[in-house]
Image (cartoon, rainbow, N blue to C red):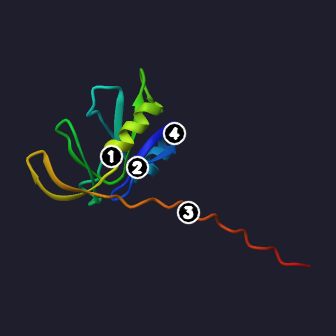
Amino acid sequence: MRVLVVEPGYEPYEKEINGLEEMQATVGGLIDAIYPYEEPVTLVCNDEGLINGLEFNRSVPGGYGGIFGPFFICGIDEDDFCSLTDEQMTRFKKEYHKAEILLGVKGNDIISLKVEPHKRTPPEPQRQPKSPER
């Protein structure tokens, strides 16, 4: 499924995720889904992000406070997660574009400073070692 990944300090990016193991690898542990929007989408995050001391990522609407550690946004259909639509992908990239620095908390309200995110640079391709000549 095609999702939007949001990591602390970085701009969001699209990723293809297939299966529970890839979901857990993306968030760095056990997954938890929250539903802060009226539309059929979910934010999937690390279930233990706060208690494991993961870095603050972004504030979330709907009284959820904030998310610690990486998360991804995906669609939901009748009984499973699914890809975001192109329109949803564009909208959530814009909504979560700015990185946030956590300044404080008042109840469930996050006090943060929105800043320009770091750009994600793709990893360089690994070179295969040359085999010895004979």
Using the image, determine if residue 118 lies above or below residue 45: below
Label placed on residue 123:
3
Q: Position of residue 108 (x, y in %)?
A: 12, 45
Label placed on residue 19:
4
Among numbered discs 2 and 1, the one appearing first in the sequence = 2
Q: Answer whether labels 3 and 2 touch (C-beta < 8 Å).
A: no
At numbered mark 4, what does the secondary structure look like: helix, strand or loop? loop
- Report the front residue among 61 and 107: 61
Q: Residues within 10 Å of mark 4 (few under 14, many from 20)?
A: few
At numbered mark 2, what does the secondary structure look like: helix, strand or loop? loop
Label 4 vs label 3: CA separation?
23 Å
Question: Which residue is labeled 2 in the image?
Answer: 12
Q: Amino acid at mark 1?
A: Tyr
Question: Which residue is labeled 1 in the image?
Answer: 96
Specify whether 61 is left or right of 108.
right
Label 3 vs label 2: CA separation?
16 Å
Q: Position of residue 11 (x, y in %)?
A: 39, 53
Q: Residue at x 31, y 46 (%)?
A: 47
Q: Answer whether labels 2 and 1 touch (C-beta < 8 Å).
A: yes
Whether residue 84 is visible? no
> Which residue in the rendered view is the most extreme toward the left?
106
Q: Amino acid at mark 3?
A: Pro
Task: Quarter of the image for the C terminus: give it.
Answer: bottom right
Q: Position of residue 9 (x, y in %)?
A: 33, 59
Q: Nearer the viewer, mark 4 or mark 2?
A: 2
Q: Position of residue 52 (x, y in %)?
A: 28, 58
Label 2 vs label 1: CA separation?
7 Å
Among numbered discs 4 and 3, the one appearing first in the sequence = 4
At numbered mark 3, what does the secondary structure look like: helix, strand or loop? loop
Q: Quadrant of residue 45?
A: top left
Using the image, determine if residue 29 lies above or below residue 33: below
